[in-house]
Image (spheres, helix red, strand yellow):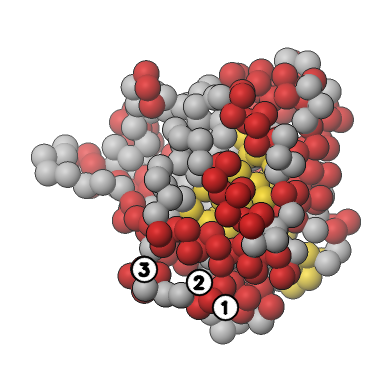
Amino acid sequence: MINTVLGEIPESKLGVCSSHEHVFIDMRGCVEITGGEPPVFYSKMDAEKRAEIYDDPYAVLDNALLDEEDKAIFELKYFKAHGGDTLIDCTSDEIGRDVNKLKRVSLESGVNIIVGCGHYYAKAHFAYVKDASVETLAEEMRTDILKGIAGTDIKAGIIGEIGTSAVIGDGERKVLTAAGIVGAETGKAIHVHTDLYTENGFEVVKILTAEGVKPQKICIDHVDVLLRPDYIRGLLDLGVYVEFDNFGKEFYINEKRRFAYDLERIRLLKRLIDEGYKKRILVCNDICLKSMWVSYGGQGYAHILRTVKNMATENGIEEKTYGEILTDNVREFIK
């Protein structure tokens, strides 16, 4: 049985899944605010601002906030209408987790929502994390999984997304260790945010497996921003999952910090499938920006069910294979 915001459901009811998303999120505290920013930085995100965020998603600070319940319901209904059944929300408390709102959105949209637990990366950490013991951090996760979140009866169905920075700090290492302890105890899958341009996945796997977590319960997220085939294969050869979770993000910040394009992601995905790695790959959008919602001119959570699916089949990935990535792979990871 799988914990959702509406209670337990059998694995057979998961259906088509997006393995890592955010329905509500507030990343504004993680955006670097410097003096002399143009007035648009502090304005509200709307269609007229889309040109500003093509090069830099945080050129408009409000783009880092998803908090509109009515629009969230619309977005998930759109996902449902295009064949989506389940969404895993990887938002931690520090960046806006709200299980009561998620429960209402799930009821209204008909989409299963599975929530995570734990702490994000250091820049977002609550102040107390710095001095908290590993056991204190582990007990928080146990409570969320076994008893309920924030005094509710809504239980976390996964751990994460646990955050790490370019250099894994002491607080992040404590959170990872705590996640490893609880993951080994409960068997829950663990999503880990890794820095987009470094190769910290190996260190993350080492920390988690040292606590007894099985590799097949670990997913290293964000491997598809800067595409490094050898790094990805190295992770897959350890038996962990990797997540192509930036579909819909094609930002060109500069040559060294650009995001891969969706077509590039699909072509690498095809190579990895041909090499026998299909069963350890997850695919999603990791929506965390207003500009990604249909309501603001984006492609929404259904992007992986529409354009990306078409792109995959047109580039040699069988529709059945792509479907298995969105169903069987997610189910095997979180069950």
Residue 308 picture location, percent across and down? 66, 28
Name the residue located 45 percent from the left edge and 41 percent from the top edge.
Answer: 195
Q: Residue furthest front?
A: 210
**Earlier along the polypeptide chain: callout 1 or callout 3?**
3
Q: Residues within 10 Å of mark 2 (few under 14, many from 20)?
A: some
Which residue does the numbered mark 1 point to in the structure image?
139
| Residue 101 in the figure: left or right of residue 240 | left
Mark 1: few/some/many CA within 10 Å (<14, 14-19, 20+): some
Q: Nearer the viewer, mark 2 or mark 1?
A: 2
Extreme residue in the left direction: 36
User: What element does badge 2 sit on?
Assistant: helix
From the image, tell me which residue sits under label 2. Answer: 134
- Label 3: state its secondary structure: helix
Residue at the spot of label 3? 130
- Disc 3/disc 2 C-alpha distance (Å): 10 Å
Disc 2 to disc 1, C-alpha distance? 9 Å
Compared with 288, 212 (above or below) is: below
